[in-house]
Amino acid sequence: MKPVFAALIDALGESSLIHGPEVAQRATSYWDPSPTRAQAIVKPRDTAQVSAALAICHRFGQAVVTQGGLTGCARGADTTPDEVILSLEWLNAIEAIDTVAGTARVQAGVTLQSLQEAARERDWLFALDLGARGSCTIGGNIATNAGGINVLRYGMMRNLVLGLEAVLADGTVLSNMDEVLKNNAGYDLKQMLIGTEGTLGIVTRAVVRLHPLPATCQAALVALRSFEEVTALLKQMQRDLAGTLSAFEVMWNSYFAAATVPGGHRPPMDRTYPFYVMLQAEGADPDTDARRFEGLLEAALERGLIIDAVIPRSEAERRALWEVRENFESILKNRKTYLYDVSLPLRHMADYADSVRERVLARWPRARCIQFGHIADGNLHLFVQPESDDADHAACDEAVYEPLLPFGGSVSAEHGIGLEKKDWLARSRNQADLAVMRSIKRALDPKNILNPGRIFDT
Ligand code: ZN
C-alpha cells in the first residue's frame, strides 16, 4: 500500500478510505456514467478529519479533488487516475436553524433540498434554488457560487453566505462562522473562497442566511412575440410587482418546442410562439396578491405585450409548468449535447443568441441550438446538439464563445470553469486578473494539490 494511504487509514480509520476496484463502482458524475478513475475515495466525518486528511496529502504531495453532489456542469470534480477524491458525503448535518435571526448552520454535504425543506418546516425560506436541488450540496453551491432561478430577488450563493469554515491545502482550518451580515474587520476571506471551485480550500461548514417564508406564490407561463417584448415585460413586472418578482425564466421556442415533443412534457400551450417566460412572484397578502398579479397579466394581454398565458390553479399545475423549464432530460436523451452557460448585457442577448444559432447551423445544418436562461441576471444557457459526426467540442466552443467576446460576455455565468472552460478563461479575463488569481493560488496551495488544473494551470 502506498504510504499516503497507510497514513490516511491511520488518521481516519479503515472505513473512511475506499480504494481498489470499488472506486470504479461510482459514476464519474451526474452527466457522465463512466466509472470513476481515482486512486482512492476519502470520506472524512468532520472538519478535524478533513484537516487531518489534507495535512497528510500535503505532506505527500498527493493531489485531491473535492466531491459533493456531482451535478456540476464544468467537469470541475472529474478525476484522473492519480488523484484522490475527498468526498463530503458524511458531513451532512444541519447543525442549527436560528428562527430569531433567520440563519442556518450547515455542513457542506447537506443537499440543497434538505436545507430548503428544513427551513420551510420552521417557516423560513432558504432562497437559493436550482433544478439539481435534490442532489447538489451546499458545499458545491458555495464552491461554484451557484445561481439558479431566484437570483433576481435574493442574489447568488455569495449573497446568502454569512459565515464559512474551510480547510486549506496544508490542513489549516479557517473558521469564520459569522452569523451576522455585517463584518468589516479586515479582508473578507469567505468571499475570497466562494466560487473558487475547490482550488483554494475545502468548504466544510457554513452559516447561511434565510428569508421569511413568503405567504403567497403566484406563477404564470406566458408567450411573447419578440425578445424586445420579453425585456419590456421584465421591466414592467419588476416595477409593478415592487420587489416580489422572484423568477423570470425565458425559453426560446427552440427550448420549449424541444421540451414538449411526444415523450417529453405535455405542452401547456401552443408550441409555436417565439418566446415563453415562466414567471413567479411571492408576496405577503393572500387577499390581493393573486388579483394584482393576474390583473397585470390581463393588462399585458390586452396591450398585446403577451400573446398567451397559462395561470396554474393548483400546486400540482404550478409544478407541472415548472417541470417544462427545469426537467430537460427528454431534450438531452440519446443526443450528444454540449452545455453552455454564458452571461452578457441584456441589450445584446437577442443578437448574440441569433448569431450563435446561425454559426452552429452554418457549420452543422442538422444541428439543434436550444436557448433559455435567467435573463434578469444576463444569464443565457445553451444546449448545442450538432447531430453530426464531425462536430467536436472545441469547434462547438468556438461557435458559442467567439461571438460572445465582442459583447463583453463571460464564458461562465454560474457553472464555473472547471476543466471544461479552461481554454477560454484567458479570453474572457485580462492578464492582470489571471496573474492575481495565480498568486493567490500559489500562496494558499504552494504544492498545487487542491483540484489542480481546474480553472487554470498554475
Ligand atoms: Zn442556470
Image (cartoon, rainbow, N blue to C red):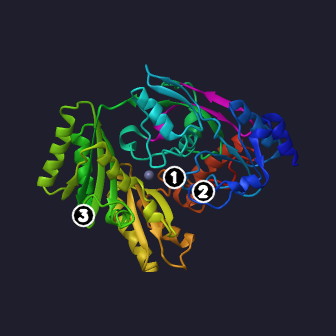
Could you tell me if residue 181 is visible in this image?
A: no
Task: Determine crowd level at label 3: few under 14, some 14-19, many 20+ residues with C-alpha closer than 10 A.
Answer: few
Could you tell me if residue 127 is visible in this image?
A: yes
Under 8 Å from ligand 1: the CB of mark 1?
A: yes
The foreground one among 315 and 133 is: 315
Q: Name the residue under label 2.
A: 75
Say if 379 sits above or below 86 in the image: below
Q: Earlier in the sequence, mark 2 or mark 3?
A: 2
Instruction: Determine the residue positioned at 66% across, 31% down.
Output: 174
Question: Is 160 a magenta residue?
Answer: yes
Question: Among all residues in the image, which is located at the extreme top?
Answer: 100
Task: In the rendered structure, find residue 415 and report the number of the disc placed on it.
Answer: 1
Residue 432, given in percent of the width and then of the height, sits at 58, 51
The boundaries of the magenta stretch are 156-178
- Dot 3 amino acid type: Asp
For label 2, the SS is: loop
Instruction: Determine the residue positioned at 28% across, 61% down.
Output: 275
- Dot 1 amino acid type: His
Q: Which of marks 1 and 3 is nearer the N terminus?
A: 3
The foreground one among 176 and 258 is: 258
Question: Among all residues in the image, which is located at the extreme left?
Answer: 302
Residue 368, given in percent of the width and then of the height, sits at 42, 72
Instruction: Determine the residue positioned at 66% across, 49% down.
Output: 438
